[in-house]
Amino acid sequence: MRPYLRLLEAPGAIPALDGLRGMAILMVVLFHAADSFRPPAGGLLAVGGWDLATPLYSGWLGVNLFFVLSGFLIAWHLLSRWTPAVSGREISAYLTRRWLRIVPTYYFVLFVAAFELTPHHPVEPGQLGLRITYHMLFLQDYLPGSILGPFWSLGVEEKFYLLMPLVLLAAWRLGTDRGAMALLAGIAALPLLTRLGMWLAGAAPAPDAFTHVWRNPFHLNLDALFLGALAAWVVHRRDALRVPVGAPAWLLGAGAAVIATLAVTAALPGNRSPFFHQVLVTPLGAIGMAGIVLGAALAPAGHRPMLEGRWLARAGKIAYPWYLTHVLVMWWAWGDLRAAFPGVAELAPPVQFAVFLPVYLAASITAALLVHFAVEKPFLILKDRVGAASPAAIAASTLPTA
Protein backbone atom coordinates (compact mmCIF):
# COMPACT_ATOMS: atom_id res chain seq x y z
CA MET A 1 0.00 0.00 0.00
CA ARG A 2 2.81 2.42 0.87
CA PRO A 3 4.38 2.42 -2.63
CA TYR A 4 0.92 3.04 -4.11
CA LEU A 5 0.54 6.19 -2.00
CA ARG A 6 3.86 7.67 -3.11
CA LEU A 7 3.71 10.84 -5.17
CA LEU A 8 7.41 11.03 -5.91
CA GLU A 9 8.86 8.58 -8.40
CA ALA A 10 12.48 7.76 -9.14
CA PRO A 11 14.15 10.77 -10.78
CA GLY A 12 13.56 10.82 -14.51
CA ALA A 13 15.85 12.00 -17.26
CA ILE A 14 14.59 15.58 -16.90
CA PRO A 15 13.47 16.04 -13.27
CA ALA A 16 12.80 19.79 -13.62
CA LEU A 17 9.75 19.12 -15.78
CA ASP A 18 7.65 17.91 -12.85
CA GLY A 19 8.49 21.20 -11.13
CA LEU A 20 7.37 23.15 -14.19
CA ARG A 21 4.13 21.18 -14.23
CA GLY A 22 3.68 22.07 -10.57
CA MET A 23 4.23 25.75 -11.39
CA ALA A 24 1.68 25.53 -14.21
CA ILE A 25 -1.08 24.15 -12.00
CA LEU A 26 -0.38 26.67 -9.24
CA MET A 27 -0.64 29.50 -11.77
CA VAL A 28 -4.02 28.27 -13.00
CA VAL A 29 -5.43 27.55 -9.54
CA LEU A 30 -4.39 30.95 -8.16
CA PHE A 31 -5.65 32.72 -11.29
CA HIS A 32 -9.17 31.39 -10.89
CA ALA A 33 -9.16 32.27 -7.19
CA ALA A 34 -7.92 35.85 -7.68
CA ASP A 35 -9.96 36.56 -10.79
CA SER A 36 -13.18 35.46 -9.05
CA PHE A 37 -12.75 38.13 -6.37
CA ARG A 38 -11.30 40.83 -8.59
CA PRO A 39 -13.40 43.99 -8.10
CA PRO A 40 -14.68 45.79 -11.21
CA ALA A 41 -12.88 48.94 -10.11
CA GLY A 42 -9.74 49.28 -8.04
CA GLY A 43 -7.46 46.44 -7.02
CA LEU A 44 -7.95 43.22 -5.12
CA LEU A 45 -4.74 43.77 -3.12
CA ALA A 46 -4.19 47.49 -3.71
CA VAL A 47 -1.08 48.99 -2.13
CA GLY A 48 0.12 52.46 -3.05
CA GLY A 49 -1.82 52.55 -6.29
CA TRP A 50 -0.55 49.12 -7.37
CA ASP A 51 -2.55 45.89 -7.24
CA LEU A 52 -0.29 43.20 -5.80
CA ALA A 53 -2.60 40.56 -7.29
CA THR A 54 -1.86 41.74 -10.85
CA PRO A 55 0.50 38.82 -11.69
CA LEU A 56 -2.17 36.36 -10.52
CA TYR A 57 -4.61 37.64 -13.14
CA SER A 58 -2.27 36.31 -15.83
CA GLY A 59 -2.12 32.84 -14.28
CA TRP A 60 -4.01 31.60 -17.34
CA LEU A 61 -0.54 31.50 -18.91
CA GLY A 62 -0.13 28.29 -16.94
CA VAL A 63 -2.24 26.62 -19.63
CA ASN A 64 0.35 27.72 -22.21
CA LEU A 65 2.98 26.07 -20.03
CA PHE A 66 0.89 22.88 -19.88
CA PHE A 67 0.66 22.87 -23.68
CA VAL A 68 4.41 23.38 -24.14
CA LEU A 69 5.10 20.59 -21.64
CA SER A 70 2.66 18.29 -23.45
CA GLY A 71 4.30 19.06 -26.79
CA PHE A 72 7.73 18.40 -25.33
CA LEU A 73 6.86 15.20 -23.49
CA ILE A 74 4.89 13.59 -26.29
CA ALA A 75 7.57 14.40 -28.88
CA TRP A 76 10.31 13.24 -26.47
CA HIS A 77 8.43 10.01 -25.82
CA LEU A 78 8.07 9.30 -29.54
CA LEU A 79 11.63 10.29 -30.44
CA SER A 80 13.00 8.04 -27.72
CA ARG A 81 10.77 5.00 -28.37
CA TRP A 82 10.11 5.06 -32.10
CA THR A 83 12.15 4.88 -35.27
CA PRO A 84 11.07 5.94 -38.79
CA ALA A 85 10.08 2.28 -39.28
CA VAL A 86 7.58 2.37 -36.42
CA SER A 87 5.32 -0.68 -36.27
CA GLY A 88 1.55 -0.87 -35.92
CA ARG A 89 2.03 -2.47 -32.51
CA GLU A 90 4.02 0.55 -31.29
CA ILE A 91 1.39 2.96 -32.61
CA SER A 92 -1.34 0.95 -30.90
CA ALA A 93 0.61 0.98 -27.61
CA TYR A 94 1.08 4.73 -27.88
CA LEU A 95 -2.64 5.36 -28.43
CA THR A 96 -3.57 3.01 -25.59
CA ARG A 97 -1.18 4.76 -23.22
CA ARG A 98 -2.61 8.15 -24.16
CA TRP A 99 -6.16 6.87 -23.57
CA LEU A 100 -5.29 5.46 -20.16
CA ARG A 101 -3.45 8.63 -19.17
CA ILE A 102 -6.22 11.10 -20.02
CA VAL A 103 -9.64 9.64 -20.66
CA PRO A 104 -10.76 7.73 -17.51
CA THR A 105 -10.00 10.58 -15.10
CA TYR A 106 -11.51 13.13 -17.47
CA TYR A 107 -14.70 11.11 -17.93
CA PHE A 108 -15.04 10.72 -14.16
CA VAL A 109 -14.85 14.48 -13.53
CA LEU A 110 -17.00 15.20 -16.59
CA PHE A 111 -19.89 13.14 -15.21
CA VAL A 112 -19.43 14.53 -11.69
CA ALA A 113 -19.75 18.04 -13.11
CA ALA A 114 -22.48 17.32 -15.66
CA PHE A 115 -24.80 15.66 -13.14
CA GLU A 116 -24.08 18.24 -10.41
CA LEU A 117 -22.67 15.71 -7.93
CA THR A 118 -20.86 18.54 -6.14
CA PRO A 119 -22.87 21.39 -4.60
CA HIS A 120 -23.07 25.01 -5.74
CA HIS A 121 -22.06 24.34 -9.35
CA PRO A 122 -25.25 24.42 -11.42
CA VAL A 123 -25.13 23.19 -15.02
CA GLU A 124 -27.56 24.45 -17.65
CA PRO A 125 -29.83 21.45 -18.40
CA GLY A 126 -30.63 22.35 -22.03
CA GLN A 127 -29.37 19.72 -24.51
CA LEU A 128 -27.25 18.18 -21.76
CA GLY A 129 -27.03 14.81 -23.51
CA LEU A 130 -25.66 16.44 -26.66
CA ARG A 131 -23.18 18.51 -24.68
CA ILE A 132 -21.94 15.49 -22.74
CA THR A 133 -21.53 13.60 -26.03
CA TYR A 134 -19.34 16.19 -27.70
CA HIS A 135 -17.35 16.59 -24.50
CA MET A 136 -16.75 12.83 -24.56
CA LEU A 137 -15.52 13.24 -28.15
CA PHE A 138 -13.21 16.12 -27.07
CA LEU A 139 -14.88 18.69 -29.31
CA GLN A 140 -15.43 21.30 -26.59
CA ASP A 141 -12.59 23.50 -27.84
CA TYR A 142 -14.77 24.30 -30.89
CA LEU A 143 -18.25 23.83 -29.42
CA PRO A 144 -19.55 25.61 -26.30
CA GLY A 145 -17.68 24.31 -23.26
CA SER A 146 -20.71 24.79 -21.05
CA ILE A 147 -20.16 22.08 -18.44
CA LEU A 148 -16.87 23.08 -16.80
CA GLY A 149 -14.55 25.78 -18.07
CA PRO A 150 -11.13 24.03 -17.91
CA PHE A 151 -12.38 21.15 -20.08
CA TRP A 152 -11.67 23.11 -23.29
CA SER A 153 -7.94 22.40 -23.05
CA LEU A 154 -8.57 18.63 -23.05
CA GLY A 155 -10.02 18.99 -26.54
CA VAL A 156 -6.80 20.67 -27.64
CA GLU A 157 -4.58 18.05 -26.03
CA GLU A 158 -6.36 15.02 -27.49
CA LYS A 159 -6.17 16.33 -31.05
CA PHE A 160 -2.46 16.96 -30.60
CA TYR A 161 -1.90 13.39 -29.42
CA LEU A 162 -3.34 12.16 -32.72
CA LEU A 163 -1.52 14.70 -34.90
CA MET A 164 1.99 14.55 -33.41
CA PRO A 165 2.91 11.03 -34.63
CA LEU A 166 2.03 12.01 -38.20
CA VAL A 167 4.11 15.17 -37.98
CA LEU A 168 7.05 13.25 -36.51
CA LEU A 169 6.97 10.73 -39.36
CA ALA A 170 6.92 13.65 -41.82
CA ALA A 171 9.87 15.26 -40.00
CA TRP A 172 11.88 12.04 -40.24
CA ARG A 173 11.15 11.85 -43.96
CA LEU A 174 12.82 15.24 -44.46
CA GLY A 175 16.08 13.58 -43.48
CA THR A 176 17.86 16.49 -41.78
CA ASP A 177 17.65 18.30 -38.46
CA ARG A 178 17.25 21.58 -40.28
CA GLY A 179 14.29 20.32 -42.29
CA ALA A 180 12.59 18.69 -39.31
CA MET A 181 13.02 21.76 -37.11
CA ALA A 182 11.75 24.02 -39.89
CA LEU A 183 8.62 21.85 -40.17
CA LEU A 184 7.93 22.04 -36.42
CA ALA A 185 8.63 25.77 -36.31
CA GLY A 186 6.42 26.33 -39.36
CA ILE A 187 3.47 24.59 -37.69
CA ALA A 188 4.11 26.61 -34.53
CA ALA A 189 3.92 29.83 -36.56
CA LEU A 190 0.48 29.02 -37.99
CA PRO A 191 -1.58 30.36 -35.05
CA LEU A 192 0.05 33.80 -35.22
CA LEU A 193 -0.50 33.97 -38.97
CA THR A 194 -4.09 32.81 -38.50
CA ARG A 195 -4.71 35.40 -35.81
CA LEU A 196 -3.32 38.14 -38.03
CA GLY A 197 -5.59 37.00 -40.85
CA MET A 198 -8.61 36.94 -38.54
CA TRP A 199 -7.78 40.42 -37.29
CA LEU A 200 -7.40 41.85 -40.78
CA ALA A 201 -10.70 40.20 -41.75
CA GLY A 202 -12.41 41.79 -38.74
CA ALA A 203 -13.33 38.51 -37.07
CA ALA A 204 -15.30 38.99 -33.84
CA PRO A 205 -13.19 41.64 -32.08
CA ALA A 206 -15.69 41.82 -29.18
CA PRO A 207 -14.18 40.82 -25.81
CA ASP A 208 -17.04 38.38 -25.10
CA ALA A 209 -15.98 36.35 -28.17
CA PHE A 210 -12.39 35.99 -27.00
CA THR A 211 -12.47 32.47 -25.56
CA HIS A 212 -14.55 30.81 -28.26
CA VAL A 213 -12.96 32.60 -31.21
CA TRP A 214 -9.43 33.56 -30.17
CA ARG A 215 -8.37 31.27 -27.32
CA ASN A 216 -9.90 27.78 -27.25
CA PRO A 217 -9.73 26.27 -30.78
CA PHE A 218 -7.09 23.61 -31.32
CA HIS A 219 -5.60 25.24 -34.41
CA LEU A 220 -4.91 28.45 -32.45
CA ASN A 221 -2.91 26.55 -29.82
CA LEU A 222 -0.54 24.78 -32.18
CA ASP A 223 2.16 27.32 -31.29
CA ALA A 224 2.67 26.16 -27.70
CA LEU A 225 2.30 22.48 -28.58
CA PHE A 226 4.75 22.48 -31.47
CA LEU A 227 7.25 24.81 -29.83
CA GLY A 228 7.30 22.16 -27.10
CA ALA A 229 7.85 19.47 -29.76
CA LEU A 230 10.63 21.58 -31.30
CA ALA A 231 12.26 21.87 -27.88
CA ALA A 232 12.14 18.07 -27.55
CA TRP A 233 13.86 17.70 -30.93
CA VAL A 234 16.63 20.10 -29.83
CA VAL A 235 17.19 18.21 -26.57
CA HIS A 236 17.10 14.83 -28.32
CA ARG A 237 19.64 16.00 -30.91
CA ARG A 238 21.63 18.35 -28.69
CA ASP A 239 25.00 16.74 -29.47
CA ALA A 240 24.50 16.82 -33.23
CA LEU A 241 23.20 20.38 -33.00
CA ARG A 242 26.12 21.44 -30.78
CA VAL A 243 23.98 23.34 -28.32
CA PRO A 244 26.17 25.89 -26.49
CA VAL A 245 26.96 25.23 -22.84
CA GLY A 246 25.44 28.53 -21.77
CA ALA A 247 22.19 28.01 -23.68
CA PRO A 248 20.11 26.62 -20.75
CA ALA A 249 20.65 29.65 -18.51
CA TRP A 250 20.10 32.08 -21.39
CA LEU A 251 16.90 30.37 -22.50
CA LEU A 252 15.50 30.18 -18.97
CA GLY A 253 16.28 33.84 -18.33
CA ALA A 254 14.87 35.06 -21.63
CA GLY A 255 11.73 32.93 -21.31
CA ALA A 256 11.11 34.07 -17.74
CA ALA A 257 11.59 37.71 -18.77
CA VAL A 258 9.04 37.35 -21.58
CA ILE A 259 6.49 35.72 -19.28
CA ALA A 260 7.01 38.21 -16.44
CA THR A 261 6.63 41.18 -18.79
CA LEU A 262 3.61 39.62 -20.46
CA ALA A 263 1.94 38.68 -17.16
CA VAL A 264 2.12 42.22 -15.83
CA THR A 265 1.40 43.99 -19.12
CA ALA A 266 -1.58 41.84 -20.07
CA ALA A 267 -3.23 42.34 -16.67
CA LEU A 268 -2.73 46.10 -16.32
CA PRO A 269 -6.07 47.93 -16.20
CA GLY A 270 -4.97 50.46 -18.81
CA ASN A 271 -4.01 47.83 -21.38
CA ARG A 272 -7.17 47.19 -23.35
CA SER A 273 -5.67 46.93 -26.83
CA PRO A 274 -7.74 44.30 -28.69
CA PHE A 275 -4.86 43.63 -31.08
CA PHE A 276 -2.50 42.91 -28.20
CA HIS A 277 -4.93 40.61 -26.37
CA GLN A 278 -6.37 38.78 -29.36
CA VAL A 279 -3.36 38.48 -31.65
CA LEU A 280 -0.14 38.74 -29.62
CA VAL A 281 -0.68 37.56 -26.04
CA THR A 282 -1.10 33.83 -26.61
CA PRO A 283 1.76 33.43 -29.16
CA LEU A 284 4.10 35.45 -26.92
CA GLY A 285 3.08 33.29 -23.97
CA ALA A 286 3.89 30.18 -26.00
CA ILE A 287 7.32 31.55 -26.95
CA GLY A 288 8.19 32.50 -23.37
CA MET A 289 7.08 29.17 -21.94
CA ALA A 290 8.95 27.27 -24.66
CA GLY A 291 12.14 29.10 -23.69
CA ILE A 292 11.64 28.11 -20.05
CA VAL A 293 10.93 24.45 -20.87
CA LEU A 294 13.85 24.17 -23.28
CA GLY A 295 16.23 25.82 -20.83
CA ALA A 296 15.11 23.54 -18.01
CA ALA A 297 15.33 20.43 -20.20
CA LEU A 298 18.84 21.24 -21.43
CA ALA A 299 20.21 21.96 -17.96
CA PRO A 300 21.98 19.05 -16.21
CA ALA A 301 20.09 17.43 -13.34
CA GLY A 302 20.72 19.24 -10.07
CA HIS A 303 21.28 22.63 -11.70
CA ARG A 304 17.69 23.79 -11.18
CA PRO A 305 17.08 23.06 -7.46
CA MET A 306 13.87 25.09 -7.24
CA LEU A 307 12.25 23.23 -10.14
CA GLU A 308 13.51 19.91 -8.84
CA GLY A 309 12.23 20.50 -5.29
CA ARG A 310 9.90 17.99 -3.67
CA TRP A 311 6.90 20.26 -3.19
CA LEU A 312 6.69 21.48 -6.76
CA ALA A 313 7.26 17.91 -7.94
CA ARG A 314 4.38 16.70 -5.76
CA ALA A 315 2.15 19.42 -7.19
CA GLY A 316 3.22 18.28 -10.65
CA LYS A 317 2.26 14.68 -9.90
CA ILE A 318 -1.33 15.64 -9.08
CA ALA A 319 -1.56 18.46 -11.64
CA TYR A 320 -4.02 16.68 -13.93
CA PRO A 321 -6.74 15.84 -11.35
CA TRP A 322 -6.10 19.19 -9.66
CA TYR A 323 -6.65 21.00 -12.96
CA LEU A 324 -9.84 19.05 -13.70
CA THR A 325 -11.43 19.51 -10.27
CA HIS A 326 -10.29 22.88 -8.93
CA VAL A 327 -13.15 24.94 -10.40
CA LEU A 328 -15.74 22.52 -9.00
CA VAL A 329 -14.05 22.78 -5.60
CA MET A 330 -13.92 26.58 -5.89
CA TRP A 331 -17.72 26.78 -6.25
CA TRP A 332 -18.21 24.22 -3.50
CA ALA A 333 -15.87 25.93 -1.01
CA TRP A 334 -17.29 29.40 -1.59
CA GLY A 335 -20.88 28.17 -1.40
CA ASP A 336 -20.26 26.34 1.87
CA LEU A 337 -18.39 29.31 3.31
CA ARG A 338 -21.30 31.62 2.58
CA ALA A 339 -23.76 29.08 4.02
CA ALA A 340 -21.74 28.62 7.23
CA PHE A 341 -20.82 32.30 7.63
CA PRO A 342 -23.43 34.45 5.86
CA GLY A 343 -21.57 37.63 6.73
CA VAL A 344 -18.54 36.68 4.65
CA ALA A 345 -20.31 37.78 1.45
CA GLU A 346 -20.63 41.30 2.89
CA LEU A 347 -16.91 41.71 3.50
CA ALA A 348 -14.64 43.70 1.21
CA PRO A 349 -13.21 41.64 -1.70
CA PRO A 350 -9.66 41.54 -0.25
CA VAL A 351 -10.98 40.14 3.03
CA GLN A 352 -13.22 37.64 1.22
CA PHE A 353 -10.22 36.51 -0.80
CA ALA A 354 -8.03 36.16 2.31
CA VAL A 355 -10.71 34.04 4.02
CA PHE A 356 -11.44 31.96 0.92
CA LEU A 357 -7.92 31.22 -0.35
CA PRO A 358 -6.64 28.83 2.37
CA VAL A 359 -9.97 26.95 2.41
CA TYR A 360 -9.93 26.67 -1.37
CA LEU A 361 -6.32 25.51 -1.55
CA ALA A 362 -6.79 22.89 1.17
CA ALA A 363 -10.02 21.61 -0.36
CA SER A 364 -8.74 21.55 -3.95
CA ILE A 365 -5.54 19.74 -3.00
CA THR A 366 -7.56 17.19 -1.03
CA ALA A 367 -9.90 16.64 -3.97
CA ALA A 368 -6.98 16.28 -6.36
CA LEU A 369 -5.32 13.68 -4.11
CA LEU A 370 -8.55 11.70 -3.77
CA VAL A 371 -9.13 11.64 -7.53
CA HIS A 372 -5.46 10.83 -8.16
CA PHE A 373 -5.36 7.79 -5.88
CA ALA A 374 -8.92 6.54 -6.42
CA VAL A 375 -9.30 7.12 -10.17
CA GLU A 376 -6.14 8.27 -11.93
CA LYS A 377 -3.41 6.10 -10.44
CA PRO A 378 -4.87 2.65 -11.28
CA PHE A 379 -4.95 3.67 -14.93
CA LEU A 380 -1.44 5.14 -14.73
CA ILE A 381 -0.21 1.76 -13.50
CA LEU A 382 -1.93 0.07 -16.45
CA LYS A 383 -0.45 2.68 -18.78
CA ASP A 384 3.08 1.97 -17.59
CA ARG A 385 2.56 -1.75 -18.24
CA VAL A 386 1.49 -1.23 -21.86
CA GLY A 387 4.44 -2.07 -24.05
CA ALA A 388 6.70 -2.38 -21.00
CA ALA A 389 8.20 -5.62 -22.28
CA SER A 390 9.46 -4.11 -25.53
CA PRO A 391 13.20 -3.30 -25.78
CA ALA A 392 12.42 0.30 -26.75
CA ALA A 393 10.20 0.77 -23.70
CA ILE A 394 12.82 -0.74 -21.39
CA ALA A 395 15.47 1.57 -22.83
CA ALA A 396 13.14 4.54 -22.27
CA SER A 397 12.08 3.56 -18.77
CA THR A 398 13.89 6.53 -17.19
CA LEU A 399 12.06 9.08 -19.32
CA PRO A 400 9.84 11.62 -17.60
CA THR A 401 6.19 10.61 -17.42
CA ALA A 402 4.09 12.11 -20.20
Image (spheres, rainbow, N blue to C red):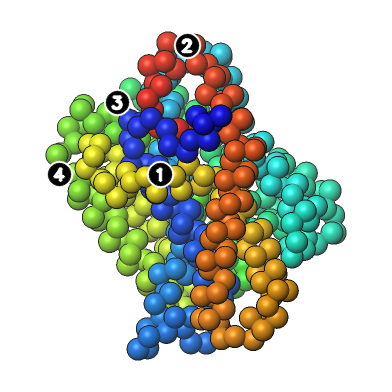
Q: Which residue is mark 3?
A: 176
Disc 1 versus disc 4: distance between alpha carbons?
25 Å
Q: Residues within 10 Å of mark 3 (few under 14, many from 20)?
A: few
Kindly state the secondary structure of the residue where label 2 is placed: loop
Q: Earlier in the sequence, mark 4 or mark 2?
A: 4
Q: Quadrant of residue 239?
A: top left
Disc 4 versus disc 2: distance between alpha carbons?
37 Å
> Which numbered circle lies on residue 246?
4
Disc 4 versus disc 3: distance between alpha carbons?
25 Å
In this image, 115 relative to 140: left or right?
right
Q: Is residue 12 above or below residue 212?
A: above
The answer, for residue 362, to whether it is visible in the render is: yes
Q: Residues within 10 Å of mark 1 (few under 14, many from 20)?
A: many
| Amino acid at dot 4 | Gly
Q: Quadrant of residue 326?
A: bottom right
Q: Residue lying farthest front? A: 2
Q: Earlier in the sequence, mark 1 or mark 3?
A: 3
| Amino acid at dot 2 | Ser
> Which numbered circle lies on residue 390?
2
Marks 4, 2: nearer the viewer: 2
Q: Which is more toward the observer, 42 or 116?
A: 116
Q: Is residue 129 above or below residue 58?
A: above
> Which numbered circle lies on residue 313?
1
In this image, 141 relative to 20: left or right?
right
Marks 4, 3: nearer the viewer: 4
Residue 292: horizontal and vertical position, in percent? 31, 50
Marks 1, 3: nearer the viewer: 1
Disc 2 versus disc 1: distance between alpha carbons?
28 Å
Kindly state the secondary structure of the residue where label 4 is placed: loop
Q: Which is more toward the observer, 337 or 30?
A: 337
The residue located at (37%, 45%) in the rendering is: 310
